[in-house]
């Protein structure tokens, strides 16, 4: 038996396999199991059709119509526009029981909230109540979410109020201000419906989750600061019209000696404590979800009764005063279809419509995933757009999905959109019979209700998680937050969108690249930074490009690969045996390449030839392979230099491969 020890040079020679000589003995091709297949050529029409389908019809909306009779297709088409005709056939008393309970519960929450949100938008209280009557009915017929509760929301009300007041003063030109609000609502609906009809819903995804978290948090702080006017009893004319934290706090403290009303503060602080305690109870025990839901209505009833019997309004406690009775009057003639305010209404409508759509989309997806059903985003956009278009013609302002109401709706056991119909019916009865009773409702209680409602929008836990996951996302989050808090809602929104786009551009123009090494005892090649145990192959540099190669990044990719090569050459300088002779580009993550990308590869190939380094490609995808051959680049580097795997490429490139002992 021979002794075990390190092999001598002669034994080592027998274990070495000269792949280059093997390649020459087999007609110039390295031994490999498979070659990279050239995909069958697609004609221009088919390729265009596929691209359009995947861009606009990725969810295959016409699948249900396949192999159906014409009459059945007509019925399915009507049901697609009005989903209630589909799920309504299976509606029963058990579902109605859940819907009526949840509808009554969210109605008790929405009525006091609506009156408060109207103040954020600088609109009469009845317009907010109108917005919880007509739009929910339209959505119930056309919407596909079972859980979303429709009505005015704090963020959109604040945004709309800010943008509108920048154009017209709500105090001195109240009628024109109201007309502009209806115009903006009309164009918000047009924007939403257009996005849905043309299946452009993916556009709202450009506003990243991190930016939304920051924007919502900043808006919550701004909304809460705005409520200090009603909470402290400061007169409107003494309070700033700006929304930034510096202006608001300066306005608050400058009126401390003569503008605050202690009775108002007592009412506001007492009921804010009650509302927060009720919210705590509901959060602590899910069975008591109804406690925070009815707490606002109880607060309104008790505070209104207290002010009425004590006539605290005579002591400086500001009250709601008159709310118009009756259901929505027509406002078609009030919408600006011409004149200087048409363009302003169009601009404000697009912005508010997009934000409303983003909020509704996030809420709908959240609850759909919790109940495990699919939500058609484009249908949702059409439904939201239709309800706002109709709403603009019936004295409503922009309505959307409310997170607080939707959460209560979900917890109350809603089964279908009928809960919105029940809520709408309660609001109808309120408008017809109860609105005069809100005359003595103190503004302080409305401020307390709004503060308690928006405090949950400050999601610091999500911000911490964003910091842990992605620092650039955190910058977007904080940029949007501080933009809203220290500048304005519009600036915060602009920063959120700008940073989101900047991140996309950064990822597109500066894709990641990595050097790969071989995992011990395997033929797998991975990033050496992620796997420090992975070893580099002598004489071979393996680089992976983690992105499609387009005109926007092709030059960077070329230069980055050359820099990797320069760095590697500096490390092995003076060592003849380890001089880089081959550059393998792992292309499996490269999903596509354009003419600029091909040109960059050609320039890379020329630069490598001057350095006497051979370019080898590994595992290009079908789209990339097709373009490599169509551009004749595959012929320039040689078809034998394109391999199915990195392992095959290394086996071809390595001058000597020593078998593992």
Image (cartoon, rainbow, N blue to C red):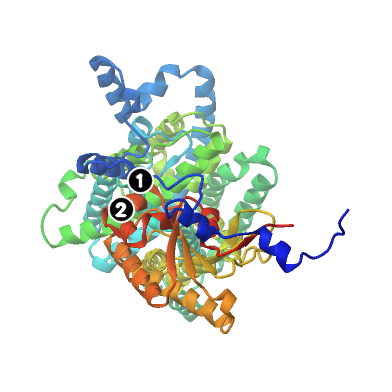
Quick one: label 2, few (<14), some, or many (20+) residues within 10 Å? some
- Say above or below: 158 vs 394: below
Nearer the observer, 469 or 657: 657
Q: Which residue is mark 1?
A: 38
Q: Return the disc, 1 or 2, that comes first in the chain's sequence.
A: 1
Q: Position of residue 472 (x, y in %)?
A: 50, 68
Q: Are marks 1 and 2 in contact (CB under 8 Å)?
A: yes
- For the point 38% across and 46% down, the residue is 400
Residue at image point 53% right, 51% down: 309
Q: Quadrant of residue 298?
A: top right
Task: Describe residue 132's horizontal placement relative to residue 189 as left or right.
Answer: right
Figure check: 546 above or below 192? below
Q: Is residue 459 left or right of residue 154?
A: right
Q: Dot 1: within a 10 Å radius of its alpha carbon, few (fewer than 14), some, or many (20 or more) residues?
A: some
Residue under numbered circle 2: 629
Q: Closer to the camera, 414 or 394?
A: 414
CA distance separating discs 1 and 2:
8 Å
């Amino acid at each position: 038996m021979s002794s075990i020890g390190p092999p001598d040079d002669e034994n080592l020679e027998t274990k070495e396999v000269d792949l280059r000589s093997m390649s020459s003995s087999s007609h110039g091709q390295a031994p490999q199991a498979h070659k990279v297949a050239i995909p069958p050529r697609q004609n221009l029409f088919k390729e265009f059709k596929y691209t359009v389908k995947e861009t606009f019809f990725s969810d295959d909306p016409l699948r249900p119509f396949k192999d159906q009779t014409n009459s059945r297709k007509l019925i399915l088409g009507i049901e697609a526009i009005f989903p209630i005709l589909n799920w309504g056939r299976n509606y029963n008393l058990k579902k109605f029981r859940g819907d009526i309970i949840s509808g009554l519960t969210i109605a008790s929450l929405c009525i006091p909230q609506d009156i408060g949100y109207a103040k954020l938008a600088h609109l009469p209280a009845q317009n907010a109540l109108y917005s919880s009557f007509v739009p929910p009915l339209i959505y119930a017929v056309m919407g596909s979410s079972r859980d979303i509760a429709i009505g005015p929301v704090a963020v959109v009300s604040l945004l709309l109020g800010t943008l509108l007041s920048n154009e017209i003063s709500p105090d001195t030109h109240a009628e024109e201000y109201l007309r502009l609000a209806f115009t903006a609502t009309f164009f918000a609906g047009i924007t939403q419906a257009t996005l849905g009809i043309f299946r452009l819903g993916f556009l709202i995804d450009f506003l990243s989750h991190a930016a939304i978290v920051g924007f919502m948090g900043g808006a919550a702080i701004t909304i809460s600061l705005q409520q200090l006017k009603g909470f402290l009893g400061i007169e409107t004319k003494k309070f700033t019209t700006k929304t930034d934290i510096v202006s608001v706090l300066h306005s608050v403290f400058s009126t401390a000696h003569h503008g605050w009303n202690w009775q108002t503060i007592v009412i506001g602080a007492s009921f804010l404590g009650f509302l927060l305690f009720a919210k705590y109870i509901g959060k602590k025990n899910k069975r008591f979800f109804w406690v925070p839901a009815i707490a606002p209505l109880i607060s309104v009833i008790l505070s209104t009764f207290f002010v009425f019997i004590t006539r605290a309004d005579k002591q400086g406690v500001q009250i709601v005063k008159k709310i118009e009775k009756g259901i929505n009057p027509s406002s078609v003639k009030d919408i600006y279809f011409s004149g200087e305010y048409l363009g302003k209404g169009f601009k404000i409508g697009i912005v508010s419509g997009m934000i409303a759509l983003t909020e509704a989309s996030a809420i709908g997806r959240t609850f759909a995933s919790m109940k495990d059903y699919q939500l058609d985003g484009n249908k949702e956009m059409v439904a939201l757009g239709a309800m706002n278009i109709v709403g603009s013609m019936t004295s409503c302002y922009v309505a959307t999905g409310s997170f607080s109401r939707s959460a209560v709706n979900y917890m109350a056991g809603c089964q279908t959109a009928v809960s919105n119909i029940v809520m709408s019916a309660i609001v109808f009865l309120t408008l017809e019979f109860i609105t005069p009773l809100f005359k003595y409702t103190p503004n302080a209680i409305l401020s307390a209700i709004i503060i308690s409602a928006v405090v949950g929008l400050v999601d610091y836990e999500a911000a911490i998680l964003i910091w842990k996951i992605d620092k650039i996302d955190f910058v977007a989050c904080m940029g949007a937050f501080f933009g809203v808090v220290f500048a304005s809602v519009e600036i915060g929104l602009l920063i959120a969108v700008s940073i989101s786009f900047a991140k996309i551009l950064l990822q597109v123009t500066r894709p990641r690249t990595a050097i790969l090494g071989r995992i011990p005892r395997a033929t797998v090649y991975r990033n050496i930074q992620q796997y420090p145990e992975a070893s580099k192959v002598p004489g071979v540099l393996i680089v992976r490009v983690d992105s499609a190669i387009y005109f926007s990044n092709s030059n960077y990719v070329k230069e980055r690969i050359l820099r990797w090569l320069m760095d590697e050459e500096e490390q092995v300088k003076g060592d003849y045996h380890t001089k880089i002779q081959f550059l393998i580009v792992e292309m499996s993550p490269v999903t596509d390449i354009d003419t600029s990308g091909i040109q960059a590869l050609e320039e890379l190939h020329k630069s490598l030839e001057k350095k006497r380094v051979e370019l080898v490609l590994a595992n290009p995808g079908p789209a990339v392979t097709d373009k490599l051959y169509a551009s004749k680049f595959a012929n320039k580097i040689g078809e034998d230099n394109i391999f199915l795997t990195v392992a095959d490429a290394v086996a071809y490139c390595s001058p000597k491969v020593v078998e593992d002992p």
